[in-house]
Amino acid sequence: MSYIVLARKYRPKNFAEMVGQGHVVQALGNALTTQRLHHAYLFTGTRGVGKTTVSRILAKSLNCVGPDGNGGITATPCGVCQACTDIDSGRFVDYTELDAASNRGVDEVQALLEQAVYKPVQGRFKVFMIDEVHMLTNTAFNAMLKTLEEPPEYLKFVLATTDPQKVPVTVLSRCLQFNLRPMAPETVLEHLTQVLAQENVAAEPQALRLLARAARGSMRDALSLTDQAIAFGGGQLQEATVRQMLGAVDRSHVFALIDALAHSDGAQVVQTVDTLRFNGFSAASTLEEMTGVLQRMAVAQNVPALAAADSTDPEAQEVARLAQILPADETQLLYSLCLHGRGELGLAPDEYAALTMVLLRLLAFKPGRVAPAQPVGDAVEKKSLKPAPEPARSAPPQPAPVAAMASRAAEPSAPTPAPEPARPPEPMLAPVAGEPQPSPELPVVSALPAVVNAPAAALPAVVSAEEADFWFDTVMDLVRRELVAALVRELALQSQLLAREGNTWRLVVDRDTLNQPGTRDRLQTALAAAGHAVTLVVNTGPVADSPARRLAAQAAARQNEAEAAMAGDPFVLQLMREFGGKIVPGSVRPL
């Protein structure tokens, strides 16, 4: 006996077997039970959601006579009588299916309507089912309007379409319309699990999740993909083989990209994209997978109880971790960038270069990003070319030590040198007529415009390297002892210690999303547990020397050493010389 594909073998035979269309099943079931039957039905929806299946079940319900031959119209057709079996096998003379995609002219419709004058031969009702009805010509629609409005009492029309906007309103007004919805991945996953259990096919849960997502709401597509995956995997469904068949991006790469973006690690982003290129994964598929993960992260950030309910998903823990380290506003921004970035891939000559640009765009437009300080020389030149501003909008010039400190804030982190003795501030610009002049008694703190939450006199003019070293050691101790995690750890790593004044420590961080009351309180509690019972005062402003910057500098130094060692290795040089080999950029990793 020839093999029957899963999509046909497990086509629902009655309303109870229908999956994901409860609203349609309930309406039709109640109408059949009370026998309040309309003469024309229109089923709409995307491919593979059950339009033709519902039509056949409705035809069986109208013509079923029951196992004993004495039954009437019912919402639960027996499936064993002559009418039910003939409709399932396509031999029922009173049930006619017309494919409007290939029979769209007025002649075909008139030939169908000519049969309407004859009463049913076998069944209780004649049922005309027209699939893809929107493909009919205007003349064909006009030819069927009168019969569709006032058919004989023994005739029922069932129309199906994937594009109801193309059906004339004169037809829509004569039908009861039911919209069959695309099915959720969870619904598809549950049905696939039941089908494979009946087929005795071993399947990994994550493989079924991939198939459920790839079906995009179509149960027929899900079963067809499952058939293909069984053949591809030699009778088994494993995640690796299904992912290879679908060409889907491994979620580990997606998690690595989001983690790198959360830590503002552009080098890791570029390296992961190079890995995707090497493995041949689609850039569009990468962005699609990222939008799915980001949507789950947004749910975890805003509705934690709902996100924690799905404990069967092995990816749930990683999604929850990323939801903690990536702020909610950046999650929304990255989701929008990925969603709109898919349209840019086809415009670029290299889709992976376009993917890199889409992802790096988040780093350029991160909320609360501090712009690099402008060099003093450029400021003088631009100031001399602009007209004098109004007195209320003018700003005092920066003293030399402060301008130097603002410039160092944009450079890579390095131990801050010991401060020079403070000098009286000198104006850097020539006086402009009508502009108030700065007072020499101004404190030397105007280079930190974002750090204004604390009194100006309390902020130090220059942060010493001793404070930076002390804060680095303290934060590393908190991390080693696992006293900080998630956002609290990020606040500690991304902040800079400005001063210790008794039991008060003053910090500065460059992102408002990290400077939240709850995060500050948890960091203060962690410090107390480590033996530092202090009060934290955290402001927002430019950071010149933070533990995160030092760790990044150390990692970069180790990477440079590893690349230099590889480039100077005699064996590597011999391979390159004799076989024309080369070192793939980004493939060298320090031990």
Image (spheres, helix red, strand yellow):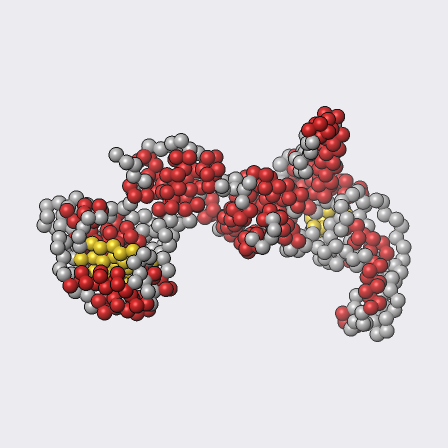
Residue at x 60% of width, y 49% of height: 350
Residue 340 image-quadrant placement: bottom right
Residue 333 image-quadrant placement: bottom right
Q: Position of residue 53 (x, y in %)?
A: 28, 50
Name the foreground residue: 194 vs 548. 194
Outermost residue, top direction? 571
Q: Position of residue 27 (x, y in %)?
A: 26, 57
Residue at x 20% of width, y 68% of height: 150
* Residue 412 visible to an observer of this rendering: yes
User: In which quadrant is the C terminus drawn?
Assistant: top right
Name the foreground residue: 442 vs 202. 202
Judged left or right of residue 458, residue 49 is left
Judged left or right of residue 162, residue 415 is right
Judged left or right of residue 39, residue 139 is right
Residue at x 71% of width, y 37% of height: 555
Residue at x 19% of width, y 48% of height: 91
Relative to 170, say whether 482 is above or below: above
